[in-house]
Amino acid sequence: MESLAKLLVVDHDEKSRAEKIRVLESAGWSVSAAASGDEALRDYDIASCEVVILDTNARQTDGPTLCQLIKQRNPTVPILRTARNGLDLAETNSDSQINGYLIEPFEPLELLSFVRSLLRLNKMRVALHDAEARLQLAQDAGGLTVFDWNLVTGRAIWSEKFAELFQLPANAADEPFNPEIIARHVHPDDRVGLSEYYKSAISGSGQFERDFRVVSSDGAVHWITARGKLIKDSLGRLERILCLNLDITERKHSDLRNAQLAAIVASSIDAIVSVDFSDTILTWNNGAEQLFDYKAQEVLGRKTDFLVPPEHLAERQTIMRQLMKGEAIEYQTQRRRKDGQTIDVWIRGAPVPGLGGSLVGGSLIIRDISAQTQREAHIRFLMRELTHRSKNLLAVIQAMARQSLSLLSSPEEFVARFSERLSGLAGSHDLLSSDDWAGASLVQLIRSQLQHYNDLFGTRIHLEGPDLILRPEAAQNIGIALHELSTNAAKFGALSDSDGTVTVSWKIVTDAQQGRRMQMRWEEHSGPPVAPPGHKGFGHMVMDRITGQALGGRSQAQFEPGGVCWVLDVPMSSVVREPVHEATVPHV
C-alpha cells in the first residue's frame, strides 16, 4: 500500500528538510531524514527505501556522486533531485541516476504528485521485472528459447537462452540481423537439408517444425527442435519469423540409449523377461527363447509357473512379493526348460515403475549357471581332496623324517638326505597339481624324478611301456620309490660312472586269480659292482616294502653284483586312473 512506502529525505538545510518531512508524512508515508549524504549512507538502510528525495546541498565532496552510491545499494530506487535554483540543478542534470527534478520553492501538492508518480513508476518497473523473471523462469524450466525476426525493419530480438545457444550478444543490436550468425552454428551435415526445409515452408503453410544439430564454439553438439511460423504480408511477402527452440539433446541421447538397450535386450544371451503384478509374461527376448526353448508367441500372456519346478513354487511366490513391494531381488535357483530338463539359473530382478511412479511389474534377467555350479562343485571336491591329500602328505613327510632321523647319521647328512627326499616328493606333487590332482603321467613322473639326467634319456636311460595316468596316491608312492632308486644309482650304482645304464619298464598283465595288474621294473646294468647294504635305511624300506604295501601289492629290491633290480607288482585299480593302450612303447 502507498501509505506504507518508506521515503528518505537528504537535505543539509534543516528548515527545508523539516518542511519536506511534514508534507510527505501528511500523505501517510514513513519518512526518514539525513542532513548529509554521509549520514544517509551510514545510518539508514538504503536498500529498503522506495524513493529518495535528494537536495543538491547534500552532495558528496569527492569520489563517486551520492546518486551513484545510493544506486549501488538499491539499483531500483527512484531519486528525486531538488535545488534552490536552476543553476544548482544544471550542475547535476547530467547524472543518469536521477529520475526527476524540482526547483524550490514548490507547492506541497507538486512534491506529493511527483513522489506518487515515482512510486507508481517503480511499482510498475518491479512488476515488469517480476513478469520478465516469471517468463524467463517458464522458458528456462521448459528449456525454451525465443527468436523474433522482423524482416521489414531487419531487427531481431531473442531470449537469453537463445543467445547462449548460438553465441549471440545477450541484447540485440540496433543494426539489421544477419542470419549467417545462426547458420554458421548449424552442423555441416544438416545445413543443406535445413535450408531446403525452410524454403519449402515459405512456399507452403508457413508453419514449421524441424530437428537439427548445432555446434557450439567448444565443439559440443546439441540437438535442437525449432517450431514456429513464417508470417507474410497481404502480398505474400515474408515479413516476420517467430520461432521457439528447444534443446532436445538429452531426449535424443535418451532415444539412442533406448535403442541401444533394445538392441542389447534383443541380442543378449541372457534371458530378459518382464512380468506384470500377476506374474504374467509381458516380454520375452531371444535369450529367453534360447535358454528355455520356448518361442515368444508360446509364452506371452502366460503365468511363469510352467517354468518353475514344483519344489520351487513357494520360493518363487515369496520372491515375487518382494519384487512387487519395490525391492530388487537376486538369487540362485532352478528352472525348467521345454524338454523338462531342470537347469541351475541366476536371477536378478528390478521393479518397473509406471508413468505415475507406481509399480506396474518387474524386469528379470535369467542366466544359465549350470556350468558354474558344476565348477563350484568340482572346486569343493578338489578342496576336500586337497585337505585329504595334505594330511596324507604330512604323514608321509613325518614318516620320512622319523626314518631318516632314526639312522645313525650326522645332522648335516640328515638335512641333506631329508631335503633331497622332500624335493623328490615335491616333483610328484607338481605333476599332480598341474592336472587339478586328477592324476599324473607315469612317463612324466619318471622324467621328473630323473630330471638331473635329461641328457641321458634314450642313451643310458631307457623307458619302455604304455604311458599310464596314475592315481594321485600311486603317483606319490611310486615317485618316492623312483627318487630313492635314482639317488642310490647316482651315488653307488649305474649312474655313478659313465658306462652304466638304467632301464625302466612296465606293463599290464592279466592274472586269472588276481585280475589285471601293473608290473614295473627298474634294472641297472654295466655300473660298478653292487653289494647289498650293511643295514636297511629309509630308502631300502621304501623300495623293498613301503611302496608295494601302500598300493595293495608288493615291491622288492635286489642288489645283484651286476646292478640293482627293483620290481613292483600291484593291482591296476589301485594305480591307473584311465583306460590305456596296452602296447609297449619306448619313451626317448
Image (cartoon, rainbow, N blue to C red):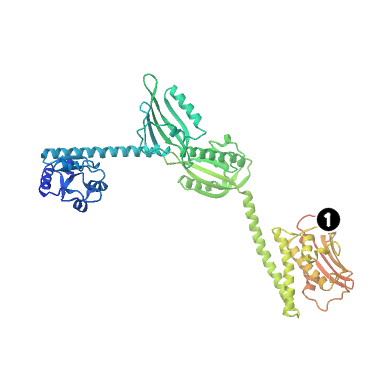
Q: Position of residue 469 (x, y in %)?
A: 77, 58
The local crowd at label 1, few if under 14, some if 14 to 19, many if 20 or more residues have their Cα within 10 Å, is: few
Q: Is residue 535 above or below residue 285?
A: below
Q: Secondary structure at mark 1?
A: loop
Q: Closer to the camera, 455 or 8?
A: 8
- Residue 376 place in picture, x, y as percent: 62, 54
Residue 290: where, in percent of width, then height?
A: 62, 40
Judge by depth and name the residue closer to the eye, 267 or 544. 267
Quadrant of the frame with the C terminus: bottom right
Q: Would residue 220 appear left or right of 398 to someone viewing this image?
A: left
Q: Is residue 570 above or below residue 331?
A: below
Q: Quadrant of residue 341?
A: top right
**Where is mark 1, residue-wise?**
582
Residue 552 shows in this picture: no
Looking at the image, residue 584 sits to the left or right of residue 328; the answer is right
Q: Nearer the viewer, residue 12 or 206?
A: 12
Residue type of the residue flagged with mark 1: Glu
Residue 462 in picture, x, y percent from top left: 85, 62
Q: Is residue 399 left or right of residue 204?
A: right
Residue lying furthest top in this view? Answer: 235
Q: What's the residue at 25%, 50% (across, down)?
A: 63
Where the N terminus falls, by quadrant?
Answer: top left
Quadrant of the image occupied by residue 98: top left
* Residue 244 seen by the camera: yes
Numbered marks: total: 1
Q: Nearer the viewer, residue 126 or 534?
A: 126
